[in-house]
Image (cartoon, rainbow, N blue to C red):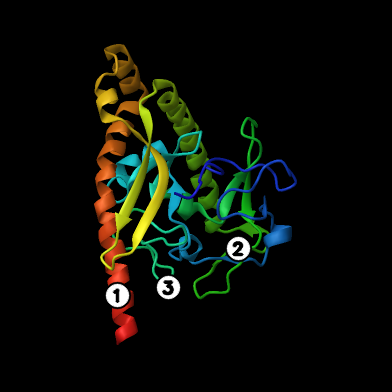
Amino acid sequence: MSDTTKGNGAAAPATDEQQRPPMFYDQPVPVSAAEHGKMKIRPEFDFAHAAKVNAVPVTAPEFVLTARCYPIIFVGPGLIPTAALGFNPDDNLFVNAQGEWDRFTYIPAYVRRFPFILLGEQGAERLRLGIENTAASAKADARALFEGEKETETVRAALNMCEQFHQAYLFTREFSQAMADSKLVEERTLDVTLANGEKVNVGTFNAVNEEKFKELPDAKVLEWKKKGFLHAVYFHLQSLNNWDTLLAKANDKANTAAAAKTA
């Protein structure tokens, strides 16, 4: 799967050359009326920015909704929880050509918060609201950031969402560390064959070994229950059944493309 181990929380300042900007971001900078007074951003339900990725980070509090739609896997040495969105690296099966996300399907918070992000070091006492500086939009229903010097509701809502996302990220980081320490997570690979005969190697990812999870000591089970980790593991395991959902969507897309060529 795509490496989503960067950018699940706050981004370092754009001047920090030691850290690569997270997925979707190239030039995250602080939001200001002076710099962005006339800037408009994507319409609320335009998710074209996510059309070319097959996986995005999710936070543990999102598992209950994510598990209804996508496989939740763990990626990279940090075991970043990640929603699988497709099999090919540049193909999100849930975004159509118009940039619309599949109806009645949960949209991960990481996708919804773009182009906003909190800026600052992870341990900083205060983080600033930032924005991807190249994310200006001229589309119909594009959203303004300022009215004169005054922030619009778009900016105020973005700050609230980014703060909530950051708190969820901190909880998720603790959860991922617990997963690593538990030795319950194992490396897996997945190969699928589409209806048109195309064979796709999904790549390597990590998932909880259910048998090892059943052997978790009672004291650890109680500890995880109190922390909220236990139900996250259950939702992760449940979500792995969604590989079949992704395969069905991939086959539908391939069949539609084949029919269009012969039409």
- Label 2 sits on residue: 135
Residue at screen point 44% across, 26% down: 180
Q: CA distance from mark 1 to mark 2?
A: 31 Å
The reply, left or right, for residue 148 in relation to residue 243 is right
Residue at screen point 51% across, 46% down: 3
Report the front residue among 195 and 40: 195
Query: Which badge, 1 or 3, is on the more N-terminal residue?
Result: 3
Total marks shown come to 3
Q: In this picture, is 110 found above or below 252?
A: above
* Residue 263 drawn at (x, y percent): 30, 87
Name the image quarter holding residue 16: top right
Residue at screen point 31% across, 77% down: 258
Point out the frontmost of discs 1 and 2.
1
The reply, left or right, for residue 156 in relation to residue 178 is right
Point out the frontmost of discs 1 and 3.
1
- Label 3 sits on residue: 98
Residue 256: which numbered mark, if any?
1
Residue 47: which numbered mark, if any?
none
Q: Residue furthest top?
A: 219
Report the front residue among 258 and 127: 258
